[in-house]
Amino acid sequence: MNSLTRHLRLLLVLSTTLTTPSTAFAPTSRSMQWVSVKCRENTQISAISSPNRETILGRSGQHFKLNRFSGKVEFGSTAALVTSLENADIESVSEWLSDEKRVAFAVWDEGMIEEMGDNIYKLKLMPLQFVTIQLAPEVDNRMWTEIDPSSGNPVFKLQSIDFDPNIQVLPGLNVPASSFGIDIEVVGELRPSRNGNGVEGKIGFVTSGNLTPPMRLLPEQALKVASNIICKTISDFAISSFQKGARSKYREFQNQAS
């Protein structure tokens, strides 16, 4: 049994002791069934003025921060997106990037993105587990293209403006979903590669929330391991989706242009 498993079992015992069972979170069949609780947040981040955008894009790899005093945890990851495109040159790549809709469906798995109108796209994620809660986030992102004044080339940009964490709480924990205070921000940008034969950029996210009293008893390393698993899962998915989607959508663009 690894240390994370031992800590999780301890947390489940502590949670049962420190909370009062509630029918609102009672299992409907098996004792380990999760009960979904939706908690729509309304962040409405400006696509231009997000104070965290440059900080997130400036990172490389995983990020973790824990404040024991306030019980707040923050973690995230920033991944490099670098993909060569078949028969590409700076002119054709620039033209492809100039249409936000073309690129939007290339940066994420096509089955997990939804166009909402007004340059807004909903990105969906697979279920993720953080200690005793599960999340299946849906993030609304504004996507647009602007010209880089220093190079004159188009830059595709992505900025989250709203989200739904889709929290699922372990039955028996008398903890309302709103108490977690979850916040999620996603950012990204994409530009022609320096040699003109592809695209390069970054995509990153950061999420934060409040730890419940039982979760605060966990060692920092156990929380960090749980967050690292989430970060790696999301980063691997984002990179894989982008590499596959960019090549496929760019090929479609070339075929339509010829």
Image: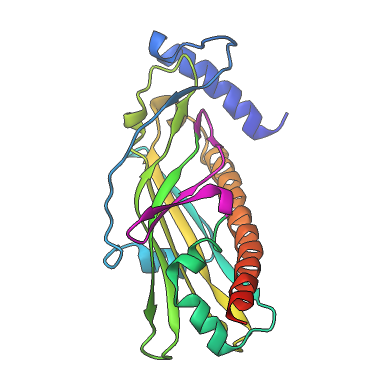
Taking the spot 44% from the left edge, 44% from the top edge, the residue there is 138
> Image quadrant for the C terminus?
bottom right
Q: Is residue 120 above or below residue 147?
A: above
Task: Give coordinates of residue 243: x percent, y percent.
Answer: 64, 65
The magenta stretch is 109-134
- The quarter holding residue 57 reads bottom left
| Relative to 33, 122 lies left or right | left
> Image quadrant for the N terminus?
top right
Examine the structure image and report whether residue 24 is included in the region drawn in magenta. no
Q: Is residue 180 above or below residue 105?
A: above
Taking the spot 50% from the left edge, 68% from the top edge, the residue there is 102
**Of residues 61 and 128, which is closer to you in this image?**
128
| Relative to 175, 234 lies left or right | right
Residue 240, can we see it?
yes
Task: Give coordinates of residue 51: x percent, y percent.
Answer: 29, 63
Q: Is residue 169 above or below residue 129?
A: above
Examine the structure image and report whether residue 118 is included in the region drawn in magenta. yes
Q: Residue furthest right?
A: 1
Taking the spot 44% from the left edge, 18% from the top edge, the residue there is 173
Taking the spot 46% from the left edge, 42% from the top edge, the residue there is 137
